[in-house]
Image (cartoon, rainbow, N blue to C red):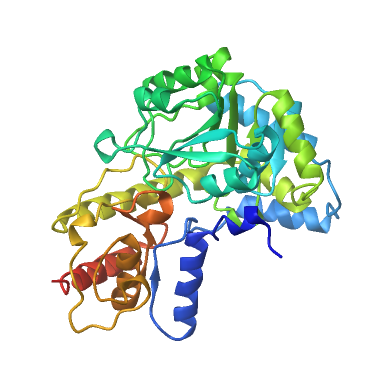
């Protein structure tokens, strides 16, 4: 009854683990959830007020499939102001979240069997979306010793006659790694020279630390821009995950093709969310800056504390709100005399799945196994929660790890 294409993919592991954490919490178990990738801050008041006003003013009907013209103009203004790139409104499409924008891209550009290079560690949905679009994800390891950043040499070696696109996610989910302008130029020049579509996922653009200067791929020159589709949105920058509002900017023919896909699937993003997004992009950005300051404090705490755990190595993230520590020193250790379940039912920490189950069962801390992101040596912890909860979570993790022999 179920298609082979759907049977070949799994459900989102981050959503599955978050759901399990919520289920345990409903049973009265005090679970600290470090699995979810959403800011714990409220949507800024001016943005919420604009959404409410849109309802009161009956802006509740269908919009053009690619999005309200005024919103696409606001996105063009943002891209010019923040990233020094020029786009016309017909080179921009608004979708129901950046995830939806990415899906539309792959559906629009891929023919059956064409390859997309997916640097690992990767966001969990990249390879599944490529598969759903009929393409073939080619996972290419970005090594820990390289700061989880792909090198031009590795990219060049992975390109075949079937390669259609490459994904560049900076700052990265799950590692927080970010590319400097020089690193991006070297990487994207390789891609552009052979005509690859560069899918630039820049959703964490605003969440960067230590004075890091974010560079948009499309700003690297005309040749690279003509091959690039920029993906962004307001979910992470303005704490609007539930509003489901993302966008893409790129060559007119690709954007037009994406609009064809969208017109036959969701039609358009929520009119109310679109109005709120206009305010998010054009209104005051003070709340965004405040979030970044707080996230940097939490990042500093998590990096410091995780590095103190014996055997753990960690590449310091430059952006996003995750740490991705290498926990493989604890593989092969056993859980003596303790109840274990799931992948840890044997009592042995064999991999990141077993470690994740162990931490859920014994520490009541929800993390995402690194295997879900293409790197089984690590786990992902989100610091998009309060400092108090982070302190409790780290203490619980350390206490649980001390029980392993």
Q: Quadrant of residue 112?
A: top right
| Front residue (pair 375, 226) | 375
Q: Quadrant of residue 55?
A: bottom right
Q: Quadrant of residue 133?
A: top right
| Front residue (pair 347, 237) | 347
Residue beneath the point at 47% across and 47% down: 123
- On the question of residue 166 being in view, the answer is yes
| Front residue (pair 115, 15) | 115
Quadrant into which the N terminus falls: bottom right
403 left or right of 34 in image: left
The x, y position of residue 200, in whole percent, is 53, 32
The x, y position of residue 290, in whole percent, is 44, 48
350 left or right of 66 in image: left
The x, y position of residue 221, in whole percent, is 53, 14
| Front residue (pair 241, 375) | 375
Quadrant into which the C terminus falls: bottom left
């Amino acid at each position: 009854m179920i298609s082979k294409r759907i049977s070949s993919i799994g459900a989102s592991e981050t959503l599955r683990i978050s759901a399990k954490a919520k289920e345990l919490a409903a049973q009265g178990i005090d679970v600290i959830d470090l699995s979810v990738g959403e800011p714990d801050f409220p949507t800024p008041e001016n943005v919420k007020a604009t959404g409410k006003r849109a309802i009161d003013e009956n802006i509740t009907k269908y919009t053009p499939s690619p999005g309200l013209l005024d919103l696409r103009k606001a996105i063009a203004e943002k891209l010019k102001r923040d990233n020094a790139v020029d786009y016309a409104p017909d080179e921009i499409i608004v979708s129901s979240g950046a995830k939806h924008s990415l899906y539309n891209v792959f559906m629009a550009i891929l023919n059956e069997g064409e390859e997309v290079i997916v640097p690992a560690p990767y966001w969990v949905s990249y390879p599944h979306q490529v598969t759903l679009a009929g393409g073939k994800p080619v996972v290419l390891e970005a090594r820990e010793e390289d700061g989880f950043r792909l090198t031009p040499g590795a990219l060049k070696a992975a390109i075949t006659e079937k390669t259609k696109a490459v994904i560049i996610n900076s700052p990265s989910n799950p590692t927080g790694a970010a590319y400097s302008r020089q690193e991006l130029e070297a990487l994207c020049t390789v891609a552009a020279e052979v005509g690859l579509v560069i899918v630039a996922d820049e959703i964490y653009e605003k969440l960067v630390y230590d004075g890091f200067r974010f560079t948009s791929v499309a700003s690297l020159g005309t040749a690279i821009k003509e091959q690039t589709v920029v993906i962004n949105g307001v979910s992470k920058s303005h704490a609007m995950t539930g509003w489901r509002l993302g966008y893409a900017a790129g060559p007119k023919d690709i954007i037009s093709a994406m609009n064809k896909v969208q017109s036959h699937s969701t039609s358009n993003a929520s009119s109310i969310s679109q109005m709120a997004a206009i305010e998010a992009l054009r209104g005051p950005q003070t709340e965004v800056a405040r979030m970044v300051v707080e996230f940097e404090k939490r990042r500093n705490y998590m990096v410091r504390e995780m590095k103190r755990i014996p055997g753990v190595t960690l590449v310091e993230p430059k952006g996003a709100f995750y740490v991705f520590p290498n926990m493989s020193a604890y593989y092969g250790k056993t859980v003596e005399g303790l109840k274990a379940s799931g992948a840890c039912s044997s009592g042995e920490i064999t991999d990141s799945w077993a470690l994740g189950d162990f931490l859920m069962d014994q520490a009541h801390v929800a993390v995402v196994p690194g295997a879900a992101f293409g790197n089984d040596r690590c786990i992902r912890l989100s610091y998009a929660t309060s400092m108090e909860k982070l302190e409790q979570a780290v203490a619980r993790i350390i206490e649980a790890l001390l029980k392993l022999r």
